[in-house]
Image (spheres, coloured by chain):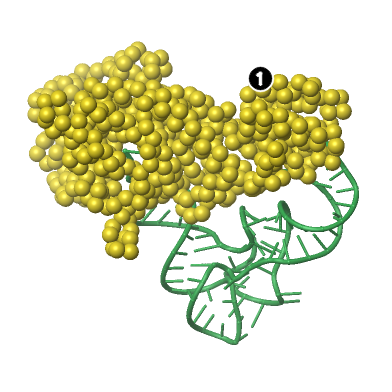
Amino acid sequence: MRNRMRRSRAFIPTSKEAPSDAQLASHIFLSRGGFISQTAAGLYNYMPLAKRVIKKIENVINQEMSKAGAEETELSFVTPASLWQESGRIEKFGKELLRFHDRKENLFVLGPTHEEMMVDMVRNRVTSYKQLPLNLYQIKTKFRDEARPRFGLMRGREFIMKDGYSFHATVEDLDREFDAMEAAYKKILTRLGLEYRIVEADSGAIGGTGSKELMVLADSGEDTIAVCSSCEYGANIEAAARGLRKDIPEAPEAAFNKFQTLGVKSIDDLSQFFKVDPYYTIKTVAKRVVYEDTTEIVLFFLRGCDNLQEVKAVNATDALDIVDVTEEELLEAGIVPGFIGPLDQSKAKHVIDNDLKDAKHMICGANELDYHFVGVDLSVLSEVAYFADISEVNAGDACPHCEGELSFTKGIEVGHIFKLGTKYSEALKAEFLDENGKAQPFIMGTYGMGVSRLVAAVIEQHHDENGCIWTKETAPYMVNVMISNIKDEAQNELGESLYESLQNAGVEVILDDRKDRFGFKMKDAELIGFPYTIIIGKELENGQVQIYVRASGEKITVDKDIVFDKVMELI
RNA sequence: CGGGGUGUAGCUCAGUAUGGUUAGAGUACCUGGUUUGGGACCAGGGGGCCGAAGGUUCGAGUCCUUUCACCCCGACCA
């Protein structure tokens, strides 16, 4: 049977040059390799090769979800805004929600995630604890009108995501399912051939607990994650915790006193002025904290050697957002920039880092121009002040779980799972009757995985200067049969017969039967990244062909009669 | 959403300070020929509303105004 998986007939528009705006390897090679084409900011067409890769990733996800007992669904992409009003998220999501009216002037949004839709589908249809648990998912295009889409498939406005939602009668059952989903996600990433890390994360605007992100490790990743050198601990820097500090510097002995410190404002100046380690100084970060309808100045206090982690700060203050504050605004509030200390609780709300609880021998601002206190003992504040974890971990800090050390690495967030609890089921009044006949809101979990982002992530982790290197489970074609010179009868004949026998054996194979020269076709094969290319060329005179292994770059010379068996063995 | 940049051939870009033949190059494409183990060579050829609208001018890719799009830094981002 003849088919069209011939390079001479296929639509695979490769090119030597990448779009001028492409920065990431995945963006460059997916564009050059004829996988994707851009239509507008953050919008891409998937050309045949990309579509094949996407299908392969989806297959792996479907298989593992099926094994884990989850059922596939597909919800409408256009969703009524009324559901978003019901959950209260229409305001929170803001401009990322693309809204529009239909001909009857009803308001709709393009689904950026489908909690509301899924809960709406299930409510009043699942009404008894006997019907639980339930795990439903879909793989579908999502749309988020990102303020700044970038990096090709990595961060588009339109993207494909697998989003799953589970419904439970008890918290224990949710915990069980959550662990099962984590295990399934690990299997998926392992099968796709990715090196990854599961990290603790901030649950963000969607709310919930037990938040974990699946990070594909790559230098180009947008997220910074802290990982332990000896145990499994890993966390997004937004949520990373640390153990007790071991090498505490020698404390400066001094009785409580006020010192004149002319013009000494920064931590650097301060530690030099008093010749003490910044560990014993108190850093103040003043911010304006934004709530739904008000804002206020909040002072965050940390050890001089630490930095404020803004996501933690937002969580600690229960705020919507945190923005910078100007010196003028501080002065207006009676606060003296450069000389702020935690001993005056009257001017603004204070949040003190946990690591400062009961700290002694400290140096801090005296809330008076050009004066600092030394020998400060913060235990006086233990009962009155508000303490929280607001500091960002540093490389070299101790692991919170073992004797190891934390270091930073970059990751691409390809999955996020967390426990929603009853947030949406309560808002949408989705309830079931429990064993006592009492109405209870569903206890929910949610499990997301970025399919189109995974396409990019595979390439970020697997490429070289010549192009893509697809893993076995992601390759658009496993074998590329290349006829070096199509005018050569013998080469042609062998190419055609190998092409056919591999197809009959169920191998995904493409035949490069183009009239181009050897070098051109090799470069093209490397750019696209087929795992194996059978080179039928000059060596055929000696009855031999070569198998080019894309990942290693090696060329295995084999007798033409055993090449089929050899390939079947390799793949 | 703030700050900046760029729009000229399918793609990558010159040309715009100082307005003036028929708007260029490389690459890709078509024809013919030579070539066939690392993105070949020779010859010929097609391809453009110079992002859009308005204006200044005898004359605008070039100057002015408006607008749209795309990109970069930041903010944002289940």
| Rendered location of residue A146, percent (x, y) | 38, 49
Query: Which sits in the foreground, A448 or B36?
Result: A448
Q: Quadrant of the N terminus of chain A?
A: top right
- Tell me which chain appears green: B
Q: Residue at x 76, y 38 (%)?
A: A519
Disc 1 residue crowd, few under 14, some 14–19, many 20+, Cα 10 Å:
few
Query: Could you tell whether A410 is left or right of A320 in the image?
Result: right
Q: Which quarter of the figure has residue A481?
A: top right
Query: Which sits in the foreground, A118 or A14?
Result: A118
Chain under numbered label 1? A
Query: Could you tell whether A490 is left or right of A63 in the image?
Result: right
Count how many numbered circles sit on residues in the image.
Answer: 1
In the rendered structure, the colour chosen for chain A is yellow
Q: Residue at x 29, y 63 (%)?
A: A104
Q: Quadrant of the C terminus of chain A?
A: top right
Hey, which residue is sitting farthest front in the picture? A1
Residue A18 higher or lower than A417, as above or below: below
Query: Which sits in the foreground, A81 or A437?
Result: A437
| Element marked by disc 1 | helix
| Rendered location of residue A334, percent (x, y) | 14, 45
- Whether residue A556 can be seen here: yes
| Rendered location of residue A355, percent (x, y) | 23, 24
Identify the residue under disc 1: A569
Amino acid at the residue labelled 1? Glu
| Rendered location of residue A174, percent (x, y) | 26, 25
Q: Residue at x 37, y 38 (%)?
A: A73
Q: Residue at x 79, y 31 (%)?
A: A494
